[in-house]
Image: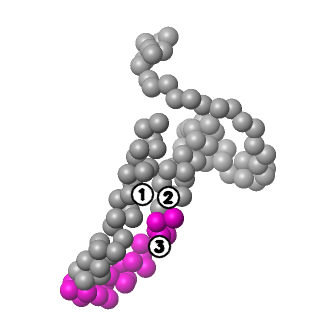
Amino acid sequence: MPRPNGNEKSTRKTESITLRVEKNIMDELRKEAEQKMESLNTLANQVKSYVTWYKPASKAGNCNVPKTLLTDMFEALTEEQIAKITENWVKKYSKDVILMITKSTIWNLF
């Protein structure tokens, strides 16, 4: 359905809620919103990233690792060792990651 200003945009159902958040957390959110030149609402809606990516990724066994740690680890390995690790990972875990991404993509369609 076209909007009154002529822009066509998919209409998604939204809901208004009231949350109680610690003042220091709200201060940080306001500061970040100002730095990014975004509204607090836009910043708060980034919770969608958590629901659609980070939460399922965690369930699939993913975790955050500093890039420098990974770099140091890979520099200590030979190319053959890296190839073997990669091959084993693909055999064991790639299905979980593909399912997670597929579910997340499907979820975003609705």
Residue occupied by mark 1: 100
Task: Provide residue 45's location: percent of width, then percent of height.
Answer: 58, 41
Magenta run includes residue 52: no
Task: Provide residue 94's location: percent of width, then percent of height.
Answer: 33, 67
Task: Characterize the local packing of mark 2: few (<14), some (14-19) or many (20 or more) Cα atoms within 10 angstroms.
Answer: some
Q: Considering depth in this image, is 51 or 6 the residue closer to the camera?
A: 51
Task: Characterize the local packing of mark 3: few (<14), some (14-19) or many (20 or more) Cα atoms within 10 angstroms.
Answer: few
Q: Is 44 displayed left or right of 59 in the figure?
A: right
Q: Considering depth in this image, is 98 or 18 the residue closer to the camera?
A: 98
| Callout 3: SS | loop
Q: Considering depth in this image, is 66 or 3 the residue closer to the camera?
A: 3
- The kind of residue tagged 2 is Pro
Residue located 29% across and 74% down the image:
91
Query: Which stretch did the figure color magenta?
Result: 58-81
- The kind of residue tagged 3 is Val
Tell me the colour scheme of the image: one colour
Q: Is 23 displayed left or right of 88 in the figure?
A: right
Tell me the mark number nearer the camera, choosing from 2 and 3.
Answer: 2
Residue 33 in sight? no
Q: Earlier in the sequence, mark 1 or mark 3?
A: 3
Q: Earlier in the sequence, mark 2 or mark 1?
A: 2
Task: Characterize the local packing of mark 1: few (<14), some (14-19) or many (20 or more) Cα atoms within 10 angstroms.
Answer: many
Q: CA distance from mark 2 to mark 1?
A: 6 Å
**Vertical comparison of 64 with 14: above or below:** below
Residue occupied by mark 2: 56
- The kind of residue tagged 1 is Met
